[in-house]
Image (cartoon, rainbow, N blue to C red):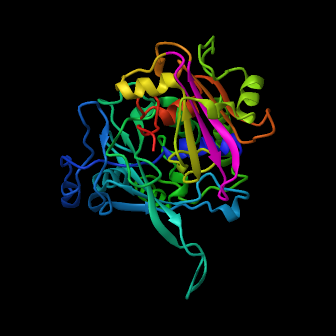
């Protein structure tokens, strides 16, 4: 899978995400008063919203980029149904701007059947994920545009709460590629029509060849590439898992990682974009990682390591993802070495490698010191 596709899964998927469940908002709309805004726990994590809440909000649209139109596989094969809080929609319709406190929710559903009595097409299957984005100057004063992005997972059961992604994981792409204040309004005619009602100008959808559209695509590609680059020096590590590219590929392809201290007894569905969300993965970890997780440490020691096998839909091994703690301080993900390859044979087929790869630490930021794997291993 192309590294850019994997990054897109994270950045755009973290784009318009989910929302919490609580206090009423300040609005003159009766509908708005009845629609609770997000709440947060003591650690500042957004609490997962109730479906009965956000499904009553203003429906914006449902983008779909199916595998059949993006061979061999799409970065976003699911339906993405997007909702905006009714009070925030009213404000956008009246002013053409997203007010402070704006919340957008994205509910993901798998592609189900491709045929019905009405004909062939793409029909929704079961729900598979939930995400959200919120504009909050008080809570996120240092984020570009004051926007923060959250995901509760791409596989049920969803997480009860989620921390905001680091800026580099989502905001960079939105800043460079979204048409209107970090929001991809160019893909939502409901929002375009609302803005057209507030401002003069056309609400026509952009297409390839349009100067802004082509510039947006170039900016998005640049943002994707940047999010796959290491942002810190790797340094030395006392882990048995090597961090030099050639040595690491040899270690993995030779199967040495299977001798690590502990491993899952079977594969499970991936909650992240490794090859593709929902495909099988299996985790191995060394003794240092196991001991730290067993102790419930808030921060894992240098040398703690994990290797994740990634399989295709037929259960064939097609790559690995690796994380190695290279220093005592996690330093926002820069103290971790990250690596992912989508080939078991080609050592140069690398998605990302090095310390502080934004794509990797952005997704893993919601874990226990960047470790998402459930423990004890099943």
Q: Nearer the viewer, residue 164 or 241?
A: 241
The stretch of residues the image draws in magenta is: 302-325
Residue drawn where x is 38% and y is 44% of the image: 98
Q: Is residue 322 magenta?
A: yes
> Can residue 179 be seen in this snapshot?
no
Magenta region includes residue 69 = no
Q: Quadrant of residue 375?
A: top left
The residue depicted at 31 percent of the width and 48 percent of the height is: 48
Residue placed at 57% from the left, 23% from the top? 324
User: Is there any visible trace of residue 69 in the rendered image?
Assistant: yes
State the quadrant of the C terminus. Answer: top left
- 46 sits to left or right of 122: left
Compared to residue 70, the image places residue 16 above or below, namely: above
Magenta region, mostly helix, strand or loop? strand
Compared across the picture, whether 25 is left or right of 312 comes to left
User: Residue 201 placed where, x, y %?
Assistant: 52, 54
Residue 261: horizontal and vertical position, in percent?
54, 29
Q: Quadrant of residue 374?
A: top left
Q: Position of residue 247 (x, y in %)?
A: 75, 23
Q: Left of 29 or right of it: where is 304?
A: right
At which x and y percent is residue 143? 42, 29
């Amino acid at each position: 899978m192309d590294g850019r596709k994997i990054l897109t899964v994270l950045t755009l998927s973290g784009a318009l995400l989910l929302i919490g469940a609580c206090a009423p908002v300040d609005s003159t709309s009766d509908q708005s008063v009845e629609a609770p805004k997000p709440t947060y726990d003591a650690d500042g994590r957004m609490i997962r919203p109730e479906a009965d809440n956000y499904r009553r909000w203003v429906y914006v649209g449902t983008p779909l980029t199916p595998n059949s139109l993006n061979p061999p596989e799409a970065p976003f094969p699911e339906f993405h149904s997007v909702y905006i809080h009714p009070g925030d929609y009213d404000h956008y319709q009246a002013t053409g701007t997203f007010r402070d406190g704006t919340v957008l929710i994205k509910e993901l559903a798998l592609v189900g059947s491709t045929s019905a009595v009405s004909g062939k097409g793409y029909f929704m299957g079961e729900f598979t994920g939930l995400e959200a984005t919120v504009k909050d100057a008080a809570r996120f004063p240092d984020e570009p545009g004051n926007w923060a992005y959250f995901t509760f997972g791409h596989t049920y059961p969803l997480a009860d709460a989620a921390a905001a992604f680091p800026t580099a994981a989502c905001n960079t792409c939105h800043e460079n590629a979204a048409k209107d204040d970090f929001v991809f309004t160019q893909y939502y005619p409901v929002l375009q029509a609302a803005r057209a009602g507030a401002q003069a100008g056309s609400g026509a959808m952009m297409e390839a060849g349009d100067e802004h559209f082509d510039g947006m695509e170039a900016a998005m590609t640049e943002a994707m590439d940047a999010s796959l680059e290491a942002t810190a020096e790797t340094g030395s590590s006392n882990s048995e898992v090597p961090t030099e590219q050639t040595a690491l590929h040899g270690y993995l392809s030779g199967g040495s990682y299977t001798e690590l201290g502990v491993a899952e007894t079977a594969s499970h569905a991936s909650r992240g974009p490794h090859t593709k969300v929902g495909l099988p993965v299996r985790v191995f970890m060394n003794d240092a990682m196991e001991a730290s997780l067993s102790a419930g440490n808030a921060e894992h020691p240098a040398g703690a390591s994990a290797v994740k096998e990634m399989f295709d839909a037929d259960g064939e091994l097609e790559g690995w993802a690796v994380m190695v703690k290279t220093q005592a301080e996690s330093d926002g993900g820069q103290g971790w070495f990250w690596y992912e390859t989508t080939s078991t044979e080609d050592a140069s087929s690398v998605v990302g490698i090095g310390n502080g790869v934004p794509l990797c630490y952005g997704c893993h930021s919601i874990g226990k010191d960047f470790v998402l794997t459930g423990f004890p291993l099943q």
